[in-house]
Image (cartoon, rainbow, N blue to C red):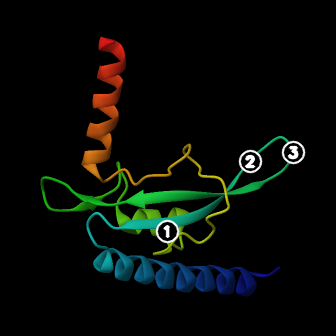
């Protein structure tokens, strides 16, 4: 492989990276606060790779930027994307436990806490 081939591969990689960053930037501009997005990830298991579904809910920080945990929407798109608006595979396992109810609904958490307190008081 000569220097021309290596230069060509570097330029091709730069072109692909620029396109991916542009798509990630467009996704970051289109994200809605509190809306659930889904990604499919390969989880390493002793018996082989197993696809699992990851849920992402973006919130606004105090400075007005969107984030899900420490990650921005563009970071999530580049590292875990593409992201889907609807659950792409409801039959697949969830990556972080059983998410039968959305996390962003505060009254569900309140109901769970009240039931736990009632059980402790009884």
Where 90 sits versus 27, above or below? Answer: above
Q: Which residue is mark 3?
A: 47
Q: Which residue is mark 1?
A: 78
Query: Whole-percent x and y of residue 16?
Result: 56, 83
Choose top left, top right, bottom left or bottom right for residue 30: bottom left
Q: Earlier along the polypeptide chain: callout 3 or callout 1?
A: 3
Choose top left, top right, bottom left or bottom right for residue 92: bottom right
Residue extending farthest to the left is 63
Query: Whole-percent x and y of residue 22?
Result: 41, 83
Q: Secondary structure at mark 3?
A: loop
Image label count = 3
In the drawing, does residue 107 fall left or right of residue 71? left
Q: Residues within 10 Å of mark 1 (few under 14, many from 20)?
A: some
Where 28 sits versus 113, above or below? Answer: below
Residue at x 79%, y 53% (from the top left corner): 49
Front: mark 3 or 1:
3
Q: Secondary structure at mark 1?
A: helix
Residue at x 50%, y 66% (from the top left corner): 38
Q: Dots 1 and 2: beta carbons under 8 Å?
A: no
Residue extending farthest to the front is 122
Choose top left, top right, bottom left or bottom right for residue 35: bottom left
Q: Which residue is mark 2?
A: 44
């Amino acid at each position: 492989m000569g220097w021309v081939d290596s230069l060509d591969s570097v330029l091709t990689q730069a072109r692909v990276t620029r396109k991916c960053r542009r798509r990630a930037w467009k996704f970051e501009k289109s994200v809605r606060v509190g809306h659930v997005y889904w990604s499919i990830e390969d989880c390493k298991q002793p018996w082989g790779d197993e696809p699992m579904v990851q849920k992402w809910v973006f919130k606004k920080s105090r400075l007005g930027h969107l984030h899900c945990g420490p990650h921005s929407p563009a970071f999530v798109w580049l590292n875990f994307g593409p992201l889907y608006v609807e659950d792409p595979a409801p039959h697949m396992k969830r990556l972080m436990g059983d998410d039968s109810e959305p996390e962003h609904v505060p009254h569900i958490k309140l109901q769970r806490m009240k039931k736990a307190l009632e059980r402790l008081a009884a």
